[in-house]
Image (cartoon, rainbow, N blue to C red):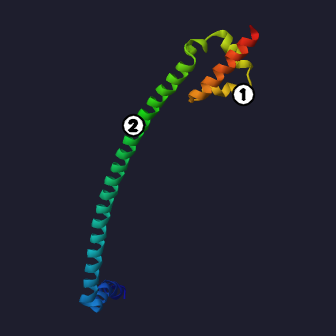
Amino acid sequence: MRRLFVVLLLAIPQVVLAQAGAGALEGLGRAGQQLGDYLSNSALLQQQSDAEIRRLRQQHDLEQQRLDRQAQTQGRDEIAIVNAAHPGWSALVTTQPFRDWHKKQPSSVQRLASSPRAEDAILMLDLYKRDQGRMQ
């Protein structure tokens, strides 16, 4: 009985394949071809994505360099404007009287010292010189 059972178990896949016939094998072949096509397309899409990412990174790097150069130029221009309005300002702001005055000012005036705008620096220096004139 046991032998018959083993023989039947071994025969079942053969019977199924025989019943499925050539059509099933062709279907498997088509599925295999479709899977191969999908994998080929996936690899191509990955290569295209990688190339686009490299292109965008290069574009980003170039734009960042342009912005850095622009900021440096703008910073030099701002310093030139402050120099024209208050010659010697860079030495003045390092003095103890200026630092003491700055500490006593409201936060709105204190923030002017960290602004990148020439107009803000000029305003702060104007206020300092005005206050110094009152003290003398």
Quick check: 97 above or below 8?
Answer: above
Q: Residue at x 57, y 30 (%)?
A: 117
| x, y percent for residue 94 | 60, 13
Element on which disc 2 rests:
helix
- Mark 2 and mark 1 lie on one chain; the one further toward the N terminus is 2
Task: Give the residue at mark 1.
Answer: 107
Q: The residue under label 2 is which amino acid type?
A: Gln
* Amino acid identity at mark 1: Ser
Q: Which mark is residue 65?
A: 2
Estimate how packed mark 1 is, as few (under 14), some (14 to 19) or many (20 or more) residues with alpha carbons within 10 Å. few
Residue pushed farthest top? 136
Label 2 vs label 1: CA separation?
A: 34 Å
Name which quarter of the figure residue 11 lies in.
bottom left
Residue 64, placed above or below residue 9 = above
In the structure shown, which secondary structural element does the residue marked by tag 1 occupy?
helix
The percent coordinates of residue 135 (x first, y second) are 75, 10
- Residue that lies at the very extreme toward the bottom in this rendered image: 19
- Name the residue rendered at 69%, 26% in the picture: 109
Q: Residue 78, can we see it? A: yes
Q: Is residue 113 visible?
A: no
Q: 56 or 9: which is nearer to us?
A: 56
Which part of the image, by quadrant, shows the C terminus? top right
